[in-house]
Amino acid sequence: MANIDTLRSVLDSHLQNNWNKQLIRWDNVAMPLSEEVEWIRPTLNIEAVENVTIGGSNNNTRVRYTGSYIIQIFSPLTKGTGDIYREVDKIVKLFDNKRFDENIFTYASDITRVGDEGNGWYQINVSIPFTSDRLHDD
C-alpha cells in the first residue's frame, strides 16, 4: 500500500526511467539551466485525503489520496511550439490511465498552455490525476 513518499517515488521513478530527452529539474535540487535547452519539472500535489471503508470491518479502512502529478515543460521562447507539444504527447502516453504498484492509478491528463511565463520560457503544464489507497494502519 502506498504512503505519500512511496507514491512520489513510484511516479518520479517512472518518469526518470522512461524520459531521456530533456533535463528533469527535481524539487529542492539545485540545477543550473541553459537558456537553449528544454527542461521539465515534476511536482506531486496531494489535493484530498479521505477514509474509505470496504465492508463493515474497521480492518478494511483505507486512506485514499487523490491529487495530481504535474509536469511543467519549458522551452526557449524563440523555439516555436512544435517540439513542446510533441513532449506533451510523450508525457500523456507515459502516464495516462496507468496502474502502478497495485494501488496507484492515473487517469487522462489535463493540458494547460501557460505560454510566456515571464523569464524567457514557453510553458505547458501536464496535470495527471491519480488516486492511491493504503490500509489505515500501514
Image (tube, rainbow, N blue to C red):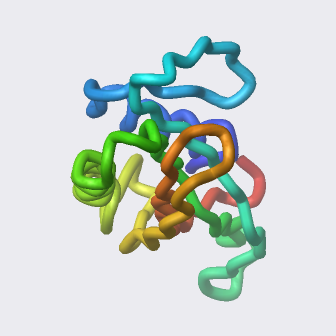
| Picture mark count | 0
Q: Is residue 10 visible?
A: no
Outermost residue, bottom side:
56
Residue 62 at x, y = what percent?
Answer: 68, 67
Q: Is residue 137 left or right of residue 81?
A: right
Residue 107 at x, y = what percent?
Answer: 40, 71
| Relative depth, front residue between 57 and 94 | 94
| Relative depth, front residue between 88 and 104 | 88
| Relative depth, front residue between 4 and 45 | 45
Q: Is residue 90 visible?
A: yes
Residue at 51% across, 52% down: 123
Residue at 68% across, 30% down: 27
Residue 16 at x, y = what percent?
Answer: 39, 28
Outermost residue, front side:
78
Residue at 77% across, 53% down: 137
Q: Which of the 4 image quadrants contains residue 95?
A: bottom left
Q: Is residue 95 above or below residue 83?
A: below
Q: Which of the 4 image quadrants contains residue 131?
A: bottom right
Q: Is residue 26 left or right of residue 79?
A: right
Q: Is residue 60 above or below residue 35?
A: below
